[in-house]
Image (cartoon, rainbow, N blue to C red):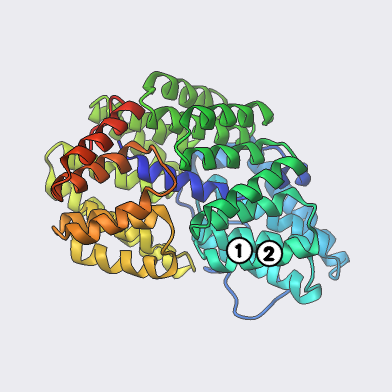
Amino acid sequence: MKTLLILKKRALLLSIPILMIGVLQISCTKSSKTGSETAASTTPTMEIPPLYERRGELAKAEEWQRTKEKVEEIKQQIKKSPGDVKPRLQIAMIYLAEARITGEHPYYYPAILTILDGVLAMDYKNFEATTFKASVKMSQHQFAEARELAEKARQLNPNNAYVYGVLVGANVELGNYEEAVAMSDKMQQLKPSLESYSRASYLREIYGQYPSSIEAMKLAVVAGLPGSEPQCWSKNILGQLYETTGQLANAEQQYKEILVMRPSYAFALGGLARVHKARKEYDKALVLLDKAAAIMPEFSFHEEMAEIYDLQGDKEKAQKKYAEVAQMLDEDAKSGHAVDLEMCKLYTQAGKLDSALVYGLKEYKKRPKNIDVNHALAWVYFKENNIKQAQQHIQTALRTGSKNPELLQKAGAIELASGNAGEGNKLIAQAKKTNPQFTL
């Protein structure tokens, strides 16, 4: 079971705004672009990049027509009052929601930054634009810049809960876990909500507290509007927590409940696929992953397919799929998304250790305290039989007391290889305690 990828995906989704979407008053695949091919701009512009046209299942959603109508309505407001920043911020929020729903990040993130830079050119101290820009930078994995922007926003408005959520995510990614906890506590004090509960849940998971992490995510689900995309996202994360702890029936229930409300929710399809994969029902998993990938251009669906091909013994098909994932990540990188850690993990899985190490060290240079980065590097060194280096990185990866079964299994393997049988067996036993069904 691929618990490290699940954890990373959860961190990415946490960086995308949820709470603020309600302000827009609208309900809550590969497609062709409307307008120009890219929304990126090196200088501030007042132009509003067009919506990215949905196709396939997502285009059939009732909310899509309302979204298009709302954007056109707001564009008319901008024409009438070009100096008013509020409607520009509304469109930025809609585009943030669309990026989340469609997975078209390479288009939407540069588009949103174009809009926000235009707002900041008119009002360089605008709190919302600064905060949303920090959120986009988080989503692009530009974590140091995201933290800097969020701190600037906090100085502008220290009593806004959302900015503390961005600071939670940025500090987690930079390895500042104690500071992340402080920001999470402040966020909950200011506004208990779906988003604050979800961040508390994530931090509890990082610190190895799975039962309380699950309870916090249940609170997030209850706090969400029934059937809304944010609530479905919360149920999806709850399903992932059940997966990580070996509660496959509970995970399956969460994913199926989401699909009753939103049949085209790609991440729930991916979650069900992982449940089938864990049960060794590989053909069923592949069918679901194909369906999810047709809805949203999400690299992790294809990476799961590659892993299943490997498990089925079809090495040629697996390598072809890994190459396809690498191309997807490369395209993401061209839009400003830092993908070094993802490339490190991908090349490790594909057995290309030289490339994996190059990307892992690039990410380590930026985030030497992050447990996921050290986890990934430790495994590359282990695969290269550099046990001393592997030990150094795995110790950093374990510093929060994580009970992630994949991390513990790998740490155990590294300790066994170094001759520390007692410690190695202890770590493997802890992994089995978290998830009795887990196999590396």
Which residue is drawn at the image coordinates 48% and 33% (left, top)?
209
Where the C terminus falls, by quadrant?
top left
- What amino acid is labelled 2 in the image? Glu
Where the N terminus falls, by quadrant?
top left
In this view, the residue farthest toward the bottom is 43
Q: Is residue 195 above or below residue 356?
A: above
Q: Is residue 5 above or below residue 248?
A: below
Quadrant of the rendered image containing residue 276: top left
Q: Which residue is mark 1?
A: 147
Which residue is drawn at the image coordinates 48% and 44% (left, top)?
10
- The x and y percentages for residue 152 are 71, 67
Quadrant of the rendered image containing residue 75: bottom right
- The x and y percentages for residue 84 are 86, 66
- The x and y percentages for residue 9 are 45, 46
Q: Nearer the viewer, residue 132 or 173?
A: 173
- Left or right side of 97 for 189: right
Q: Is residue 147 visible?
A: yes
Which residue is drawn at the image coordinates 53% and 62% (left, top)?
107
Q: Is residue 277 visible?
A: no
Q: Secondary structure at mark 2?
A: helix
Q: Nearer the viewer, residue 211 or 415?
A: 415
Q: Are marks 2 and 1 in contact (CB under 8 Å)?
A: yes
- Neighbor class of circle 2 (other Cα within 10 Å; few <14, some 14-19, many 20+) is many
- What amino acid is labelled 1 in the image? Arg
Q: Which residue is mark 2?
A: 151
- The x and y percentages for residue 47 are 71, 71
